[in-house]
Amino acid sequence: MTQSTRRLLAALAAVLTLVAGAAFAQTELRMTWYDDGSESEVMSELVERFEAENPDIDVVIDVVPYSSGILESLPLQLASGQGPDVARVTDLGGLQEYFLDLRPYLDDPGYWDANFGPFHDWMRPDGSDAIPGFMTQLTVTGPYVNATLFEQAGVEMPGEGATWEDWAAATNEVADATGVFAMAMDRTGHRLAGPAISMGAQYFDENGDPVVTDDGFRRMAELMVDWHADGTMIPDVWIGSQGSYVAGNEQFVNGQVALYMSGSWQIGQFTELIGDAFDWKAVPNPCGPSGACTGMPGGAALVGIADTDHPEEVARLMDFLAQEEQLAEFYGRTLFIPGHLGLAEGGVDFDADLPATQDALSQFAAEVPKLADAAYALQGYQYNRVVFDATRDRLTQVFVGELTLDQAIERMQRDIDEQIADAQ
């Protein structure tokens, strides 16, 4: 065989390889994803298995920051028809108009109804039987504490039934003794809502319209104002970051705060980043004068996007990922509370040896039965993002001296009313 013949055969082989590849990879799906910890690694492995079983589909996972990518950019992309084929979202009610109904493309929609049915009501219009997606995690908000700081300070930790004021007093003792800040809370109206409901906030009037003018909401708002004024709350999170969602996880991981109000989705990250560097634990949600000791339910869902050019391929991908085998591995490795009813009932084998991790998972699971009705109602409300953003932004203006609390509450309510009217 001459050299020219060998070159010709090599070129022909390369062409055939490209042709064969094209034949098995005719459809590309783009998935927009964000990480609370490192769950994109697990999702990538599951997607690779799907691609091996479905060689005609390529899935590209675009991992974006939660705040700028999911909360800010994705809604604009969806509104302009430039969104991905699949996305992981947390604004389940506010973005529901953009979700694909998978039901016509599924071989067994009954499986989805049986295992995800209650959560579909969070992401579809009232009365609809659409199947938009599945929960990648069910979450509950609640506080974490740095137990090592309490021990170093010689301060006894408040127990079950303690109030937010009790925790503020105890963590301020810790702060005085150790030189850290007493508390941090993620900068979002969602994290504020659980404590506010415990204080008596109803969030809805007798007509079902959202309100933030009652005494319960004001009690919690006043505490937040006081805590930022006297240095109880670390300023970096709410005051230092106007205009967007900000988490306080970095400050907690770095041992800068004694108590951090966030939620169950942080367990995996704390397991990885803190480990046993110091003693950390999840504690029960503090109580308020309403008698409630509640956090907020919530979670993230993976949904198909209605503007996709490939609804059948999206449904094949979603159906593969939603099966019990895949989700058991996903929840177990990411340390997320299952959003699959069958797995929630049967249990998940969590990949966690650290006692703090196991204790935190148990603590947040124990919070679920204590969630107030108002918390479920607010989480399921289509325009809850409007409420969360208005309370966050106007309250921040009080912290920095731009508004009084009376002015802020008045403008919160006006923002909510106007934005919902515009959206309807």
Image (tube, grey):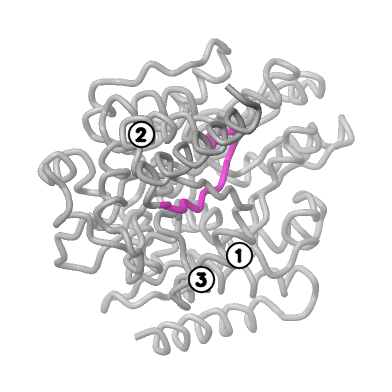
Residue positioned 75% across, 51% down in the render: 233
**Is residue 301 shown left or right of residue 106?**
right
For mark 2, what is the residue?
A: 50
Dot 3 amino acid type:
Gln
Residue type at mark 2?
Phe
Position of residue 146 measured from the top left corner of the image (x, y, whole percent): 70, 28
Q: Residues within 10 Å of mark 1 (few under 14, many from 20)?
A: many
Mark earlier in primary sequence (3, 1): 3
Would residue 34 be counted in the magenta stretch?
yes
Residue picked out by circle 3: 77
The front one of 31 and 370 is 31
Q: Quadrant of the C terminus?
A: bottom left
Q: Is residue 379 above or below residue 107?
A: below
- Which is nearer the N-term, disc 1 or disc 2? 2
- Label 1 to label 2: alpha-carbon separation: 48 Å
Q: Tag 1: residue type?
A: Ala
Q: CA distance from mark 3 to mark 2?
A: 26 Å
Tell me which residue sits at (72%, 73%) in the image. 398
Give the residue pinned by disc 1: 221
* Residue span colored magenta: 28-40
Q: Secondary structure at mark 2?
A: helix
In the image, residue 134 sits, relative to residue 7, either above or below, namely below
